[in-house]
């Protein structure tokens, strides 16, 4: 059939030829999910192709990455390029929001980056699994303690840019923590000690908001570990509440923290 008879194929369809057959369906579903998010149309308004976003991007100075590249792919519905960008480059962004502040079209470029990252986790893309793997303990402490980093995580190998300072901090961390005049912060294995009820409520929020569903896709072992802790704490809290309601516990017998159980 002649070209003028069949018409031009949409660029979104033509771009699929560059993707591996086993990737095409996932790539299409991924991009459709991103575009169907209500934030997408609010964040992406257009592009003058001025390059201001990339010229001020600190990540672009050190990595093969540029915000304008992503915006152009989105404007063209380039499924293959969005797929490649998400799997190779999207994690280079440091979320400084310089691009968003400088864009003359008022695009929320950093927000679009976050959209791609969120859906990369939801779709359990290889790049999401790879980037989150080193942060497994951070995720664990956030979801179970509400602490992003615990003092005993400050080790020289984890913070090589600190130089001798990291060695000094790690050697004397116990002393530093015991000097804090707050009982809940004198340990090194937690940043602070949440109460049992606070811990259960926090983890319930993680479950109800869908965070744990996303974790299950990228790290099933971490999901199982956290859910086991949640079920144990929930059962402990219910037992304490039941005993309290029956008058079997005095106020001074209630635990100050779940760590006391």
Image (tube, rainbow, N blue to C red):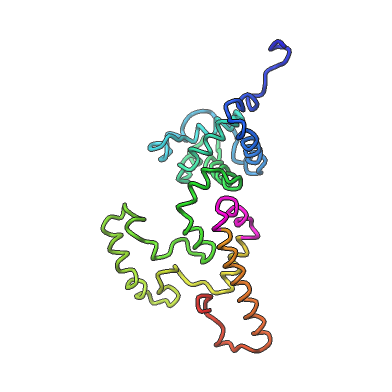
Quarter assignment of residue 80: top right
Whether 184 is drawn above or below 133: the answer is below
Q: Is residue 75 visible?
A: no
Quarter assignment of residue 32: top right
Residue visible at 58% across and 33% down?
A: 74
Relative to 161, 204 lies left or right: right
Q: Position of residue 174 (x, y in %)?
A: 34, 72
Quarter assignment of residue 78: top right
Relative to 214, 6 lies left or right: right
Q: Is residue 140 visible?
A: yes
The one nearer the camera, 30 or 116, is 30
Q: Residue lying at the far left in this picture: please name it.
A: 164
Q: Which residues are magenta?
A: 207-222
Whether 126 is drawn above or below 211: the answer is above
The one nearer the camera, 221 or 178, is 221
Q: Quadrant of the N terminus?
A: top right
Residue visible at 47% across and 30% down?
A: 51
Relative to 57, 129 lies left or right: right
Whether 214 is drawn above or below 2: the answer is below
Is residue 212 magenta-colored? Answer: yes
Q: Position of residue 245 (x, y in %)?
A: 68, 84
């Amino acid at each position: 059939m002649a070209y003028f008879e069949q018409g031009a194929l949409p660029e979104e369809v033509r771009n699929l030829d560059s993707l591996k057959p086993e990737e095409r369906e996932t790539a299409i579903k991924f991009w459709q999910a991103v575009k169907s998010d209500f934030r997408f149309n609010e964040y992406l308004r257009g592009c003058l192709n001025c390059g201001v976003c990339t010229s001020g991007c600190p990540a672009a100075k050190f990595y093969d990455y540029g915000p304008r590249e992503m915006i152009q792919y989105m404007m063209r519905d380039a499924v293959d390029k969005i797929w490649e960008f998400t799997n190779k480059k999207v994690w280079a962004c440091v979320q400084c929001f310089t691009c968003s502040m400088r864009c003359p079209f008022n695009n929320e470029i950093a927000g679009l980056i976050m959209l791609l990252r969120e859906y990369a986790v939801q779709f359990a893309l290889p790049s999401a699994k790879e980037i989150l793997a080193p942060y497994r303990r951070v995720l664990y402490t956030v979801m179970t303690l509400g602490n992003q980093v615990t003092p005993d995580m400050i080790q020289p190998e984890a913070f090589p840019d600190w130089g001798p300072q990291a060695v000094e901090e790690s050697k004397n961390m116990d002393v530093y923590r015991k000097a804090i005049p707050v009982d809940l912060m004198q340990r090194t294995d937690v940043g602070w000690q949440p109460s049992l009820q606070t811990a259960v409520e926090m983890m319930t929020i993680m479950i109800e908001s869908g965070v744990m569903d996303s974790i299950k896709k990228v790290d099933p072992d971490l999901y199982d570990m956290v859910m086991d802790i949640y079920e144990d704490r929930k059962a402990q809290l219910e037992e304490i509440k039941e005993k309290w309601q029956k008058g079997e516990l005095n106020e001074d017998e209630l635990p100050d923290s779940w760590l006391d159980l």
